[in-house]
C-alpha cells in the first residue's frame, strides 16, 4: 500500500517528550510565580521609601519582580526545550532500537527469507514479547514452507510415475500392433486406478487442511463400526481378526471426514500386519473433555524413528509394507490432517510385541 510520507515514530516521540517537558516546566514556573505574588504587594508599603530603594529592589513590588523573573523563566524554558529535544531524541532511539530490528526482520521475511531470527536479548517486555512471537511465527512458516515444498515434490513424483507407465505401455502397443490388447488394457486400468486414488487422496487432504466442511454431532464409535464392517472382507483376505469395543464417543465434526479417518486407520492396521493370524483392536473411550479412538495391530517390531515419520506424506513404512497393497502413501497423512482440522491430536506408539498403536483424541460433545 502506498502511503504519503509522514513523521517518523522517533521524531514523534521526541516532540512529545519535549512538549511534555515544556508544559511541565511552564506549569512549575507558573506555580512559583503565583506563590510569590501572594507575598509581594502591588506597590510599596513604606511611604518614606525613595525611588532609588524601590528601583534597586530593597522593597520589591510586583512590577519589579516581574521584570526580574520573566527573563529567567524564559531562559529556563528555552533550556528545557533544548534538553527535551536532545534527550527525547536519544531516549526514543534507545527505546525504538528493538523495533528497528523487528522491522528489518519483517523486510527480510517479505522477500522470502525465513531462516533468520530476531532473538532480542534482555528481560521480557512488549518489544521482546513481540520479537519472540515473530520468531515463533517465522519458525512455523519455515517448517510449513519446507513441508509444502517436499509435499509438492513428492506429489509430482507420485503423479508422474503412473503417467510415465501409461505412456510406456501405449508406446509398446503402438510399436507392436499384434500385442495382446487384453493384458495391455488390464495394466492400463491398474495404473489409471492408482492415479485416480492418488488424486482423490490429494483432494481429500487439501479439503481437510482448509477446514472447508460443516461441523455436526458425530458418534465416533458408529464410525468405527461402519469402517470395520466395510473392511471386513479385506481383513479376511489378509487373515486378520478385528476386535471392536468401547462406549459411545460423541464429538463434533464432518461425518464423511471422520469416517475416512477411521477407515484409513483400520485399513492401515489390516494391511500392515502379520502375514497370517494377525489381530486389530479398535477401541473408543470417553474422557472428561475428550473422546479417543484407538487402533492397535500386531505386526513386525517398529523403531521409534520409523514411527515418527509415518504421518508424513508419501511415507509408506517400507520396512513393513505388503507388496499387494502399496497404497498411495497418504493414509496416515490424511488421518493427521483430519485430526488437526478437528482440533484433535494423534499419537503413534510402537508396541513392544510388534505392531503399532495409534490414538486419536478429539474434543468431546455432550449433547449428541
Image: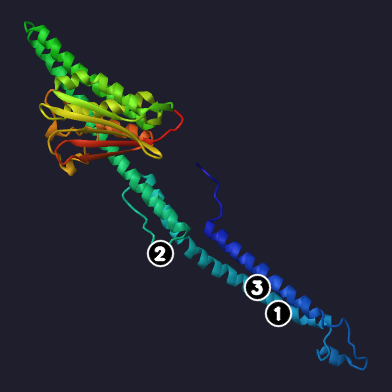
How far across and how far down the image is residue 133, in percent? 41, 51
Residue that appears at 61% across and 66% down: 18
Q: Residues within 10 Å of mark 1 (few under 14, many from 20)?
A: few
Q: Is residue 116 left or right of residue 306?
A: right
290 and 37: which is toward the camera: 290
Which residue matches tag 2? 122
Which residue matches tag 1? 72
Q: Earlier in the sequence, mark 1 or mark 2?
A: 1
Q: Earlier in the sequence, mark 1 or mark 3?
A: 1
Local secondary structure at mark 1: helix
How far across and how far down the image is residue 162, in percent? 18, 21
Picture quadrant of residue 331 = top left
Q: Please, is residue 134 above or below residue 40 in the view? A: above
Q: Is residue 91 left or right of residue 288?
A: right
**Residue farthest top in this picture:** 178
Which image quarter is the C terminus in?
top left
Q: Earlier in the sequence, mark 3 or mark 2?
A: 3
**Separation of residues labelled 1 and 2 (CA atoms):** 43 Å
Residue that appears at 14% across and 28% down: 278
Residue that appears at 30% across and 26% down: 224
Which residue matches tag 3? 78
Local secondary structure at mark 3: helix
Amino acid at each position: 500500500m502506498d502511503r504519503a510520507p509522514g513523521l517518523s515514530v522517533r521524531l514523534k516521540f521526541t516532540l512529545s517528550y519535549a512538549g511534555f517537558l515544556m508544559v511541565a516546566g511552564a506549569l512549575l514556573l507558573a506555580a512559583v510565580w503565583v506563590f510569590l505574588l501572594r507575598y509581594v504587594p502591588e506597590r510599596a508599603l513604606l511611604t518614606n521609601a525613595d525611588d532609588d530603594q524601590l528601583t534597586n529592589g530593597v522593597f520589591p513590588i510586583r512590577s519589579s519582580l516581574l521584570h526580574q523573573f520573566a527573563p529567567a523563566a524564559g531562559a529556563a524554558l528555552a533550556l528545557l526545550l533544548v534538553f527535551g529535544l536532545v534527550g527525547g531524541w536519544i531516549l526514543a532511539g534507545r527505546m525504538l532500537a528493538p523495533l528497528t530490528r523487528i522491522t528489518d526482520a519483517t523486510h527480510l521475511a517479505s522477500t522470502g527469507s525465513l531462516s533468520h531470527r530476531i532473538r532480542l536479548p534482555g528481560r521480557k517486555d512488549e518489544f521482546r514479547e513481540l520479537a519472540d512471537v515473530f520468531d515463533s511465527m517465522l519458525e512455523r512458516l519455515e517448517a510449513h514452507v519446507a513441508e509444502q515444498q517436499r509435499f509438492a515434490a513428492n506429489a509430482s513424483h507420485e503423479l508422474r510415475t503412473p503417467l510415465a507407465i501409461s505412456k510406456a505401455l501405449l508406446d509398446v502397443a503402438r510399436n507392436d500392433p499384434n500385442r495382446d490388447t487384453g493384458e495391455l488394457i488390464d495394466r492400463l486400468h491398474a495404473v489409471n486406478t492408482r492415479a485416480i486414488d492418488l488424486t482423490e487422496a490429494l483432494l481429500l487432504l487439501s479439503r481437510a487442511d482448509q477446514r472447508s466442511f460443516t461441523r455436526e454431532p458425530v458418534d465416533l464409535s458408529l464410525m468405527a463400526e461402519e469402517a470395520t464392517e466395510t473392511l471386513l472382507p479385506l481383513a479376511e483376505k489378509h487373515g486378520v481378526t478385528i476386535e471392536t469395543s468401547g462406549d459411545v464417543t460423541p464429538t463434533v465434526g464432518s461425518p464423511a471426514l471422520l469416517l475416512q479417518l477411521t477407515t484409513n486407520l483400520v485399513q492401515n492396521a489390516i494391511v500392515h500386519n502379520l502375514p497370517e493370524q494377525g489381530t486389530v483392536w479398535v477401541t473408543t473411550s470417553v474422557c472428561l473433555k475428550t473422546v479417543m479412538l484407538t487402533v492397535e495391530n500386531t505386526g513386525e517390531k517398529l523403531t521409534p524413528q520409523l514411527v515418527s515419520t509415518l504421518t508424513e506424506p508419501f511415507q509408506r513404512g517400507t520396512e513393513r509394507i505388503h507388496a499387494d497393497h502399496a497404497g498411495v502413501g497418504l493414509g496416515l497423512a490424511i488421518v493427521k490432517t483430519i485430526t488437526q482440522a478437528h482440533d484433535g491430536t494423534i499419537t503413534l506408539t510402537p508396541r513392544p510385541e510388534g505392531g503399532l498403536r495409534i490414538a486419536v483424541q478429539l474434543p468431546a460433545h455432550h449433547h449428541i
